[in-house]
Amino acid sequence: MTISSRSDLEGMTRVGQLVARARRYMRDAARVGMTTEQLDDLGARFLRRAGARSAPQLAYGFPGFSCISLNDEVVHGVPGPRKLERGDILKIDVTAELDGFIADSAETVLLPPSSDEGRRLRRCAHVAFARAMRVARAGIALSEIGRAVEDEVMRHGFSVIRDLTGHGVGRRIHEEPAVPNYYSPLTRGRLREGQVLAIEPLVSSRPARVVEEPDGWTLRTHNRALAVHHEHTVIVTRGRAVVLTAA
């Protein structure tokens, strides 16, 4: 969507801050021995108390409230009986709808004792997102976001997961445009003032494509490479983009 009124801005700000609080609440609650379903239930209760609904459930009939992925699982992990273990790389991806507006945000949590590789991967995704924010301005070619992310990921010695992209968001969970995390001259268009995007570096420890697990939802790396995910919903402006889902 594109912000076109004060009510649009207020609605996106409300849902963005709620998603940020829910993501942080789930992050702080995550413990070794807890099941991913228990963690999802905590987030679901938090969001429902505020009047929010699960956007993945509304749009796609997703079997959980939020997506919870572990280790080589990249995105769309289905909450269930699997227990969190020491050293897991946990991805919490919260996408909620409130009063007709949708925000999307994800972070990677390293359960102790974290590995050096896990720490470097997570830092890489954070820095790649920050690099993208420096170019995400009205009038800039959309492809420059992918160039910024990919350059930073390569500088760290890791790989962008090319099968998955960021996207527009706001009134629906996935809107145009797709926002690749790599540069391609085929990525058309320029960023517009007020445009709402989910920018999300998805990084793997080595080159990998994604494959679908038998549950029909979870996407993991084909070669079991570790993966991290860092995502925020942002509004494009003439200056620095406004991050709606910052904690």
Image (cartoon, grey):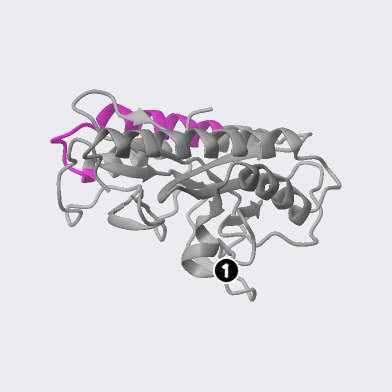
Location of residue 78 with respect to 156 vertically, above or below: below
223 left or right, relative to 104: right
Relative side of 57 to 241, left or right = right
Task: Identify the residue at the far top of this view.
Answer: 239
Q: What kind of residue is marked 1? A: Trp
Residue 147 relative to residue 61: left or right:
left
Specify whether residue 67 is in view: yes
Give the magenta range: 123-143
**Residue 118, horizontal then vertical, whole percent:** 64, 38
Q: In the image, 137: left or right of 50?
A: left
Residue 113, percent from left and from top? 78, 34
Q: Does the magenta stretch include residue 24?
A: no
Residue drawn at x 38%, y 45% as measured from the top left:
198
Q: Name the residue under label 1.
A: 217
- Location of residue 72 (image quadrant): bottom right
Tell which of 1 and 131 is nearer to you.
Answer: 1
Q: Position of residue 227 (x, y in %)?
A: 57, 49
- The chief SS type of the magenta part is helix
Image quarter in which the C terminus is found: top right
At a point 38% along the width and 39% down the height, the residue shown is 12
- Residue 155 appears in the rendering: no
Q: Which of 50/119 is in front?
A: 50
- Name above or below for residue 148 compared with residue 174: above
Instruction: Give the x, y percent position of residue 217.
Output: 57, 68
Asked if residue 134 is positioned above or below residue 169 in the image, the reply reads above
